[in-house]
Structure formats: structure tokens, C-alpha cells
Amino acid sequence: MNARGPVIEAREVALSFGRTPALRGASLAAGPGEILAIMGPSGSGKTTLLHCLAGILVPDSGEVHFAGERIDTLSEAGRSALRRDRFGFVFQFGQLVPELTAEENIALPLLLAGGRRAAALREAGAWFERLGLDGLHKRRSGELSGGQAQRVALARGLVARPEILFADEPTGALDSLNGEQVMELLVTAAREQGTTVIVVTHEPRVAAYADREVIVRDGKATSYSAARAES
Ligand SMILES: Nc1ncnc2c1ncn2[C@@H]1O[C@H](COP(=O)(O)OP(=O)(O)OP(=O)(O)O)[C@@H](O)[C@H]1O
């Protein structure tokens, strides 16, 4: 696959939890820098598909390719290294480390990648002004509002300039104003860095920030171009 091919791709991915089929041959592909929204009814398989793409879950059948390499056949250690070094993550409830300050939380991916503490904190610090978090460097997650904590989580997901950011309902716990702000920051920062974004959401207003939507229904995925204006 050449550099213009998809950066991440699922091919006919199937996965069951016991007797519950979560995915039944789902395929999708995202190009470099593309922002893709995964939508669909509750229980349709969105999170499972995201986890298969990110190497968190291994499909029963089908293939997952990243940057031209098959990744579902890698060992757990290989997939874990991929997640640490090349992917970023944002979840619905920020999942910040409560013992760490906001700046330490943001710096975490850089430290895990072997970066030096002073340099990592400096880089983390650059995100505060950009995200409207000035003066909150030393706060712990319990001392931040939901919107502030989610912006910290977003910075942590992007600070190491991952090739792909996986976001699972990143605005799901926020009111609509905070949700739109987080999405706007996410999209702006990802575009600046050229990061591909795969975002699971059930909110059309969040999906409207994406270049393209993929609808998952009954464990299968269908792609729609961004021709939402007519509908
Ligand atoms: N760890 C698990 N163990 C057993 N069943 C699971 C597990 N995770 C998901 N499932 C089942 O797999 C199916 C797909 O779940 P998934 O979380 O991918 O759906 P979803 O579209 O993300 O749903 P939601 O929008 O409600 O978050 C559902 O039937 C769910 O109950």
C-alpha cells in the first residue's frame, strides 16, 4: 500500500463476545489526516470496531491494517507498543490519573515514550493557553470542571503527535456548549498536526465536524460522504 492509501483500515472484521456477535464483517478505511465519525444505534458495534482498529481487541476474523502493515496479527506487546508510540486516545470520561497534576497528565505519553521530564512538562505547558486552560497547570483532575478535564484529556491524546487519535464519545459527558468547544479544539489541533481522527459519537452535532461518517448497524459499517447539508 503506498503513502496515499488508507492509514487505517478494517477489512471484514468480525468479533463475538461469547454468543453475542458485536461485529459481523465490518469494513472501513480512513486516509491520512481524515476525520471520520462512527455513528449508529446503541449496541451496534461502534466501540468494538474502534477497539479493533486501535489494536485493543483482536477480531475473530478479518484484518486490520495500519500504515500498510497488518496489525491484528501482532503480539499483545506489539499492539501495545503501537498504541503507546503511534496512537492517541480520548475517552468519554477523560480518565485522567487523579494523583497527577493537569500538566503531568498531559505530559504522560511523552514520559512513557522515554522523554525527559523537564522537556515533557514544557511541551505539555504549551497546550494550556491553546485550550483555554491558563493557570490550571497544577490542578488535579478532581479540581477541574468536566469540560476542563476533557480538554486536558484531549491534550494528552494529541501531545505526542500520534498518527491516529481514537476518540470514544469524547463529548458524551459534556453539555452541548462544552462538547462543541472540545470538538472544535480536537479538530483544529488534529488538522494542524495532520493526525487522522476516528471518533465514535451518537451526536450529529459532533459528527458534523468530521469529513465523513460511517454508520455501524448490526455489526456492519457503511460509509457516507459529508453531504449532510441536503438532509
Ligand atoms: N466486553 C463485552 N462483553 C460482552 N458483550 C459485549 C462486550 N462489549 C460489548 N458487548 C456487546 O457487543 C455489542 C456491541 O457493543 P459496542 O459497545 O461495540 O456497541 P456500541 O455501538 O459502541 O454501543 P453504545 O452506543 O451503546 O456504546 C453489544 O451487544 C454489547 O452488548
Image (tube, grey):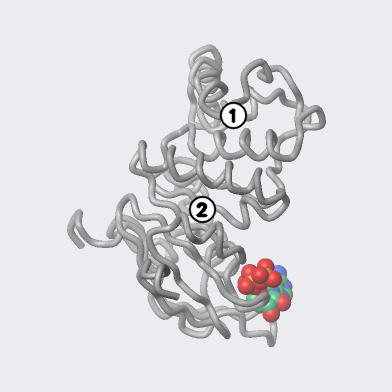
* Local SS, label 2: strand
Q: In this orientation, which residue lies closer to the viewer: 26 or 173?
A: 173
* Local SS, label 1: helix
- Few, some or many C-alpha atoms within 10 Å of disc 1 (few <14, some 14-19, many ≥20)? many
Residue 26 got which mark?
A: none
Q: In this orientation, which residue lies closer to the viewer: 143 or 227?
A: 227
Image location of residue 13, percent across then percent down: 46, 77
| Image point (55%, 18%), residue name | 125
Which amino acid type corresponds to the residue marked 2 in the rendered image? Phe
Q: Are marks 1 and 2 in contact (CB under 8 Å)?
A: no
Classify residue 131 as left or right of residue 61: right
Circle nearer the N terminus (1, 2):
1
Image location of residue 178, percent across then percent down: 66, 43
Identify whether 151 is placed above or below 2: above
| Residue hosting label 2 | 166
Quadrant of the image containing the N terminus: bottom left
Residue 106 got which mark?
A: 1
Quadrant of the image containing the C terminus: bottom left
